């Protein structure tokens, strides 16, 4: 929000004194092996790091502030001369989190005393999970995550294509909306056209991607796309 026209005491700070950051330990060991940072950066099981009151004088000295307090698991930094019960513009709350030492399972390539991502056939294999898991379980979970991501991306692609086609035909709808009955029919026709065409194009794209590796599934998707066009034509004729 541009606060340049507000009273001076209500001007927003030009920049935050701190930015969100994730720091990775330069050396993380798993037994006798050192983990590559690309593996450790795949861990996200953060827990709150609650500083004790003893750290407050050191923080005040380091930042040149007075009145630093702990509030709800946060360090409250009164840059705006406020306090937790009466915050002012410019005050900052800082939350610290960390990943404690824990048991993890890793699928990676051993290189001396290091565990690194395995690169083979144009793919990179680097799996890490908290807890003790067998290799089949690790690969099964990774495959499940990939499938979920693929489905989500396809749904997003379909929705974006639908919106794009709907916007493309919106001038026709806008031009006829003031005509009784014709406006309603044009809006219905535009929605039907955009929906069916987006479905056909999405199915065709997936079928093309699977044509070599899963020809039967690709053929089924093509049949479904053709059936969608036939259904839309029947509806339009009625």
Image: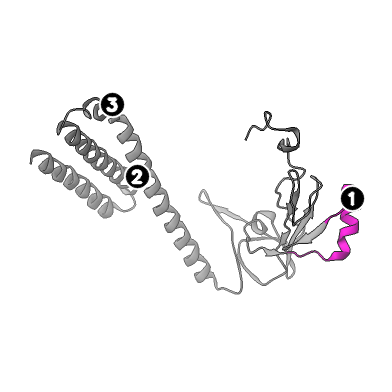
- Label 3: element kind: helix
Label located before the other in sequence (1 or 3) = 1
Q: Which residues are magenta?
A: 49-68
Q: Residue 57's x, y, as percent?
A: 90, 58
Q: Is residue 95 visible?
A: yes
* Front residue of this view, candidates 72 and 43: 72
Q: Residue 187's x, y, as percent?
A: 22, 36
> How far apart are the alpha carbons under marks 1 and 3?
61 Å
**At 35% from the left edge and 38% from the top edge, which residue is drawn?**
163
Residue matched to label 1: 62
Q: Which mark is residue 171?
A: 3
Residue matched to label 2: 158
- Up the image or down, 51 lies above or below 122; here it is below
- Within 10 Å of the Cα at label 3, are there few (<14), some (14-19), or many (20+) other Cα atoms? few
Q: Nearer the viewer, mark 3 or mark 2?
A: 3
Q: Is residue 157 left or right of residue 126?
A: left
- Within 10 Å of the Cα at label 1, are there few (<14), some (14-19), or many (20+) other Cα atoms? few
Q: Quadrant of residue 10?
A: top right
């Amino acid at each position: 929000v541009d606060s340049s026209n507000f009273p001076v005491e209500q001007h927003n700070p030009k920049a935050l004194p701190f930015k969100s950051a994730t720091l990775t330990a330069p050396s993380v060991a798993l037994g006798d092996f050192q983990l590559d940072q690309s593996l450790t950066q795949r861990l996200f099981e953060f827990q709150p790091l609650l500083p004790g009151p003893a750290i407050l004088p050191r923080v005040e000295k380091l930042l040149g502030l007075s009145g630093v307090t702990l509030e709800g698991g946060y360090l409250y930094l009164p840059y705006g001369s406020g306090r937790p019960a009466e915050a002012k513009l410019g005050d900052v709350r800082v939350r610290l989190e960390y990943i404690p030492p824990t048991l993890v399972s890793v699928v990676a390539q051993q290189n001396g005393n290091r565990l690194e991502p395995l690169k083979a056939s144009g793919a990179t294999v680097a799996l890490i999970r908290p807890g003790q898991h067998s290799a089949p379980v690790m690969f099964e979970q990774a495959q499940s995550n990939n499938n979920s991501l693929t489905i989500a991306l396809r749904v997003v692609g379909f929705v974006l294509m639908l919106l794009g086609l709907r916007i493309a035909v919106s001038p026709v709808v806008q031009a006829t909306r003031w005509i009784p009955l014709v406006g309603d029919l044009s809006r219905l026709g535009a929605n039907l056209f955009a929906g069916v065409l987006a479905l056909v194009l999405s199915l065709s794209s997936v079928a093309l991607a699977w044509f070599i590796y899963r020809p039967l599934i690709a053929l089924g998707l093509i049949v479904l796309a053709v059936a969608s066009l036939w259904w839309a034509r029947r509806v339009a004729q009625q």
